[in-house]
Image (spheres, helix red, strand yellow):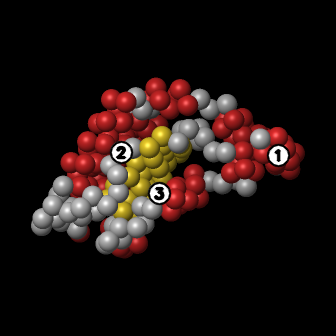
C-alpha cells in the first residue's frame, strides 16, 4: 500500500489539479455510497431484469458497479472505458457461444459508465445504437436515478439482443445474472 501511495503522489506532482481531484474522489469514495444506491433489493431487481431478458434471446448481460479505481489504476490514468474493457475480459463477458455478451459498467467515483458489447452484437447493433442507449441512460444516471438508468439500459440491450438473437428454445445461461459490486 505504501508503494501504491508513492505512485499516486508521483502522479500528482507530475500532473496538476485534474489528477489531484480525480485521485481525491477515488481515494475517499465510499462503498457505503455505492451500497446506498445499490441495496440488496435494487440488486435483486436488476438480477431479475437480466434473467427475464435472457429468456427471450441467447445473449448475455452483465452489470458491474465499481466504487473507485485502485491507486495503481489512477497512477496509470486508467479511464472508465479502459477499466470497463478490463472488467469485460476479467469476468469473461466475451466468452459466449455467439459472441453476444454485453457489459454495463458503472464507476461511481467518476460518475461514469460504459456499455461494452462483444463483437457480434456490436457489429449487428452498430455504434450509433450504443451511443443512443448511453444517452438515454445518462439522463437518469445524472439525476442519481441509478436503478432506473441501469434497468433502462438492460431493457434497451434486451431489445437489440432479442432482435438479432431470438431464442427459439430456452438457451443455457452462460454467465451469471447476479450484479457485482467491486
Q: Residues within 10 Å of mark 2 (few under 14, many from 20)?
A: some
Q: Secondary structure at mark 1?
A: helix
Q: Pinpoint residue 57: horizontal percent, then vertical percent.
A: 21, 61
Q: Pinpoint residue 113: horizontal percent, then vertical percent.
A: 49, 48
Q: Which mark is residue 65?
A: none
Q: Residue at x 40, y 72 (%)?
A: 119
Q: CA distance from mark 2 to mark 1?
A: 34 Å
Question: Which residue in the protein does label 1 denote?
Answer: 3
Q: Nearer the viewer, residue 181 or 33?
A: 181
Q: Which mark is residue 178?
A: 2
Ranked by sequence position, the earlier of labels 2 and 1 is 1
43 displayed left or right of 32? left
Q: Quadrant of residue 141?
A: top left
Q: Residue furthest left?
A: 168
Question: Which residue in the protein does label 3 denote?
Answer: 91
**Is residue 12 something that shows in the picture?**
no
Q: Secondary structure at mark 3?
A: loop
Ranked by sequence position, the earlier of labels 2 and 3 is 3
113 displayed left or right of 43? right
Q: Residue at x 31, y 61 (%)?
A: 174
Q: CA distance from mark 2 to mark 3?
A: 12 Å
Residue 103, placed above or below residue 28: below
Amino acid at each position: 500500500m505504501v508503494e501504491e501511495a508513492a505512485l499516486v503522489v508521483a502522479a500528482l506532482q507530475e500532473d496538476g489539479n485534474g489528477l489531484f481531484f480525480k485521485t481525491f474522489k477515488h481515494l475517499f469514495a465510499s462503498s457505503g455510497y455505492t451500497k446506498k444506491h445499490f441495496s440488496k433489493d435494487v440488486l435483486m431487481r436488476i438480477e431479475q431484469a437480466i434473467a427475464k431478458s435472457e429468456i427471450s434471446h441467447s445473449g448475455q448481460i452483465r452489470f458491474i458497479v465499481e466504487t473507485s479505481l485502485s491507486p495503481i489504476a489512477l497512477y496509470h490514468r486508467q479511464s472508465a472505458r479502459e477499466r470497463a474493457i478490463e472488467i469485460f475480459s476479467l469476468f469473461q463477458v466475451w466468452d459466449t457461444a455467439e459472441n453476444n455478451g454485453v457489459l454495463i459498467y458503472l464507476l461511481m467515483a467518476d460518475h461514469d459508465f460504459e456499455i461494452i458489447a462483444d463483437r457480434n452484437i456490436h457489429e449487428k447493433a452498430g455504434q450509433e445504437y450504443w451511443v443512443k442507449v448511453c444517452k438515454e441512460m445518462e439522463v437518469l444516471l445524472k439525476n442519481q436515478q441509478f436503478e432506473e438508468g441501469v434497468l433502462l439500459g438492460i431493457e434497451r440491450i434486451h431489445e437489440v439482443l432479442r432482435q438479432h438473437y431470438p431464442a427459439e428454445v430456452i438457451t443455457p445461461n452462460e454467465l451469471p445474472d447476479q450484479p457485482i459490486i467491486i
